[in-house]
Amino acid sequence: MNAPVWNLRDRQRRDRLARAAQALGPRLTGRHVATDAATALLEAVLQPRDRVCLEGNNQKQADFLAQALTQVDVQRVHDLHMVQSVLALPEHLDVFENGVARRLDFSFSGPQGARLAKLVSSGGLEIGAIHTYLELFSRYFVDLTPQVALVAAQAADRQGNLYTGPNTEDTPAIVEATAFSGGIVIAQVNEVVDTLPRIDIPADWVDFVIPAPRPNLVEPLFTRDPAQISEIQVLMAMMAIKGIYAEYGVQRLNHGIGFDTAAIELLLPTYGEQLGLKGRICQHWALNPHPALIPAIEAGWVKSVHSFGSELGMEDYIRARSDVFFTGADGSLRSNRAFCQAAGHYACDLFIGSTLQMDLQGNSSTATLGRITGFGGAPNMGADARGRRHASPAWLKAGAEARAGRSGAAGTPRGQKLVVQMVETFREHMQPAFVERLDAWTLQEQAGMALPPIMIYGEDVSHVLTEEGIANLLLCRSDEEREQAIRGVAGYTAVGLARDARMVENLRDRGVIRRPADLGIDPRETTRNLLAARSMRDLVRASGGLYAPPKRFRNW
Amino acid sequence: MNAPVWNLRDRQRRDRLARAAQALGPRLTGRHVATDAATALLEAVLQPRDRVCLEGNNQKQADFLAQALTQVDVQRVHDLHMVQSVLALPEHLDVFENGVARRLDFSFSGPQGARLAKLVSSGGLEIGAIHTYLELFSRYFVDLTPQVALVAAQAADRQGNLYTGPNTEDTPAIVEATAFSGGIVIAQVNEVVDTLPRIDIPADWVDFVIPAPRPNLVEPLFTRDPAQISEIQVLMAMMAIKGIYAEYGVQRLNHGIGFDTAAIELLLPTYGEQLGLKGRICQHWALNPHPALIPAIEAGWVKSVHSFGSELGMEDYIRARSDVFFTGADGSLRSNRAFCQAAGHYACDLFIGSTLQMDLQGNSSTATLGRITGFGGAPNMGADARGRRHASPAWLKAGAEARAGRSGAAGTPRGQKLVVQMVETFREHMQPAFVERLDAWTLQEQAGMALPPIMIYGEDVSHVLTEEGIANLLLCRSDEEREQAIRGVAGYTAVGLARDARMVENLRDRGVIRRPADLGIDPRETTRNLLAARSMRDLVRASGGLYAPPKRFRNW
C-alpha cells in the first residue's frame, strides 16, 4: 500500500505555479502577468474538473478574465465546476457552451436566466444548486472550496497588493477561501500603481496580477429614477411607513432594489417627518448606497449604512458623508457582501422586498417558466434569523404577535424578524402577482430540482402589502385565515376576487387586514408631490451636487 | 443653524491620533508603540462612552491590552461600552468594577459567568444583550460599530502588518468593522519581525502596534482526554452514528466541545468502519482542530475541516495535513470565526451539542441560577437555517419528516437542519438534565431580560439523544407527542418517570423513539475498547508524533 499523501493541494499548487512560470516566461514578473498572456496563464494554471470561482458579483465583473476563460484550449481545460455568485455576462455561459465548464453552483443569474434554462434543458450545464449569497460563500469553506479564483480589483501595487475601490463586494470571501486552501488567486486590475490608496487584499493572498485592457464592468443596479415612481407606489410606501415601520419601531433594516422601496426612502423626510418619526425609525441600514436615500440622509434620518457593494456615481457623496458610510482611510467605500449579508440576517429587524408571484400560503418566487434566475440575498434576509438572541422592540413585538395564544414549543416566547412582501396586485402586462400555484412548481419538474425554487417561504413572511392593504400574517392562526388574509389584499386578481368577503371583513375587524383608510391615509394625499425628490436632478440637487449619476440616468 | 457635520468620525480619528502622538512622544515610532506606553496610549486614544472591542476570543486573548485598560485614569476614560465576544479574563470584568466600562454586549462569558451575574445585580454593569458570535459581528457593521478595537496577533512587521498565526479567530471581523468606520485599531503582538510568515491583517488597517511583555494567552479549550470518556458516552456515540449520522447520510457537520461528541469522533474509524460508513458520512467539518478527530483523519474519513480558532499542540499536525485544514502559505492554520460560523449555519447539515437543562418543549439552556454565561456559537449553528436553498440528502430527509402530513405554509416542502441535543439524563452531582421548567425563566426575572436566555429552542431541535434512546422530534405532531417523546428518553429523572408509558410505547412503535436495541446496538459491544484512542498518548501515537499536547494533558 502506498503511503497516504496529505499535501496534494500544496503539490498541485506548486505544479500550477511552475507551469505558469514556464508558459509565460518573460511575460511574468514577480506576480505581474502581461495582459496578452491571460489565456496562456489560465491554460497553464487550470486543470480539468477544477472548481473555479470567476468573480461575478452583483455589480463588479471580472470581465477580462471571463473573456480569457472562453478562449482556453478545451483539450486542456474542460469540465470546470464554476462556483460563482452571479452569472451576469454572456461569457459566464459561453464557457458552458464551449465545454470549458460543465457544472455550476451559483446565487443569481438575472439577465442570463433564460439562456441558463436552455443550457440546462439541453444538457450542456449541470446545476449543483441555487444558493443565497452567504450560503454560497459558506460552502466555499466547506465543500465548494475553489481551486482557482479569478477576481477583479481597481488597482494593484508592484508587490501585488490589491485595492478594490468601493466595489469590494465578494472579493474578500472568495480570496480567503481560495488562498488559504492551497488554491491560486488571479486578479485582473484596471491599473498598476506605485502606492495604493488603501489595501483591500494583501499581496500575500494573491498569486497573479494582470492588467486588463479596459476597466472592469460595474453596473449601477441600485439607481431608481424617482420620475418613474407611480402614485400607487407612493400610497404603498405611506402604508409601509405608517402601518409597519412606525407600528413596530423599525430602526435597522434592509430594502430591496425596486421602485416600491425607493418610494419609501423618498417619503421619509416628507411623510415620515409629518408623522414625527425622525429618530424613531430607519436609523441603521444594511443597503447598497441607494441614491434614493440621499434626501433622508441629508435630513438627518440615517446614522449608518453598511453596504454589499457600491453604486456608480455615489463616490463623492459617500466620501463627503463618511459618518454614515463604511469608508477606508482613502475616503472611499469599503463594501463587503459577506459581512453585509450577515448584518442583513442577524442585525436587521426588517426586510422588505418584492416578488413576481405569491401563492395562498404566502410562498413567493421570482422564478418564472423558461428562466432560472436564482434569488441573490433575498432568502438570507427574508428568513427569520432563528439563531438571533438580542432583542429590539420591533423583533419582540413581531415575535409576540406570532406566538400569542400558542402552546408548547411554538408558544415559547421568541422574537421574530419582520419580512414584508410589497407587491402591486398586478405586475407588468397585467400579470397577477397572486396565483393559486407558483410557476416554481412547474420549474421544479422541468429542471428536476429537489424542491421548487421558492424565494421566500410563506412561513417566514410577516406582512403582505399591496395597494389594497396590509395583511399581517403573524396574526393568522390557521391555513384558512392566512389564505383569506392574502386574498383580502389581492385586489382584482382571480385570487382576490375569490375571497370569502365575510371572513375578510372579520380579519379586518381584528386588525389582521388594514386598509389605507384604517391607517388614516387619505387617498388625496397620495401624490408624487410627497416624494422628497421627483427626478434624478432632484437627487443631484439634494446631494449638493455630490451625486453624479451615470449618463443613462441623466435626462435633463 | 450650524451646517451639519458629516465627518465627525474622521475628525475624532485625527484628534485621537494627534493625542496619541503628543502623549507618547518618542515612545511612538511609525505605528510602533513602546511596551511601557500601553496605558498612556489607551488614555490618549479613548474617550468616555466609546464603544470598545477588547479582543476576547474563545481562545486567544488580548490580555496585555486588557490589563492596560484596567490601569487607565478613570477620570479620563470611563463609561465605555464594551462590545466583545468573550469575557474570559478577570480583567474583562475589572474594567466594570473600577468604572472604566459600564455597558456590555457579548456572546460568552463561561468562566466569568458568576461574577458577571453579581456585577449586573449590583448595578455595576448594564448588559445590552447576549448574542451568538456571528450576530455580534453582524452588529459591528450596523449599530454596535467599535470606535476602538484592541486586538492580539502573533507578530507584526516594521510596517505594522499583522500575522495572527493559527488563532486568527475574531480578528478580521473586528478590525474590518473598526478600520473602515474611522475607528482606531491597536494590536498587541508577541514579537516584531522583519518578515512575517504571512500577512493576516494589512498594516493599512492597523493604527498602533505594541509588543506585549509575554505571549498572549491562548487556551486549549477543545482538547478532550479520551481516558475520561465513559462507556455511557460510547453507547450514546454509537447511537448517534448509527441512528442519526447513517440514517440521514450526514456529510457536513459541526460538533460541540464535550466528551460526548469526542466519543463520536473516536468511534468513526472503528464502529463507523464496521458499519461500512466511511465516505458515506462526516467528510466535511466546521470545527476547531479537535485532537480527537486525529484517528478519523488518519483513517481517511475527513476531506475538510474549516475552523473557528485553532488548538494548542495541533500546529505540526495541521501543517502536515494541509489537504484537510485551511492553512496559509506558511503552512499554519488560518482560522476565522465569522466565516466558520457562517459555514456552520449555512453549509452544515447537522449540529450536535450538549446542554445543561431541557424542558418538555425541548427548549434547552446552559444558563443556571447565579450565572450569566451566554451561548457562543450554539444558537447560530443549532438553529434551522431558514435562508438555505441548496439541498442535500440529510437536509431533505429531515425536512420531509418535519412536514409530512402538514398543510398550508407549514406543509410547503422545505429542507431542515438536523439539530441534535446529546445529553445524559443526569449530569454532575445527579442534577437531572430534564426539567419541567428551565432555570432560564428565573434568570430572566432576576436580570430583567426581555426573554429567557434559551440556548436552543425546542422548535429547532430535531433529535434528543440520551443513554435511553433517541427521540425524533421531527416526527411529533402535537405538543403532547413532543412532551412524551422527551419524557420517553429522560430515564430516571422525575420528568422521565412521569411518562405516559403506553404513549411512549406507541411512539416507539412509530419510530419516534428508538432504543439502543431498536438500532441493533448490543450493550455488550459498548466498551471503551471501541475508541480509536483511549488516552492522550494514543492520540499522539495516531498522529505519528505530530500532535504535541499541552503539558496539562500529558499524563504519561
Image (spheres, coloured by chain):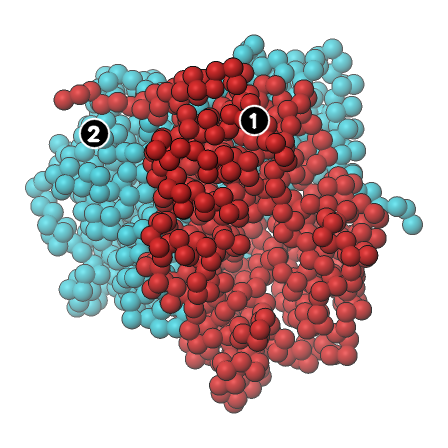
Chain colours: A red, B cyan
On screen, A333 above or below B361? Answer: above
Residue A433 coordinates in the image, percent (x, y): 53, 72
Horizontal side, residue B218 vs residue B266: left or right:
right
Residue A290 coordinates in the image, percent (x, y): 68, 52
Which of the numbered marks, if any, corresponds to residue B299? 2
Name the residue that disc number 1 marks.
A35
> A2 or A349: nearer the eye?
A2
On screen, A327 above or below B196? Answer: below
Q: Are marks 2 and 1 in contact (CB under 8 Å)?
A: no
Mark 2, secondary structure of its residue: loop
> A49 or B230: nearer the eye?
A49
Residue A192 coordinates in the image, percent (x, y): 64, 24
Q: Amino acid at mark 2?
A: Ala
On screen, A511 above or below B221? Answer: below
Q: Residues within 10 Å of mark 1 (few under 14, many from 20)?
A: some
Q: Amino acid at mark 1?
A: Thr
User: Residue shown at 80%/52% (left/top)?
Assistant: A540
Q: Is residue A441 visible?
A: yes
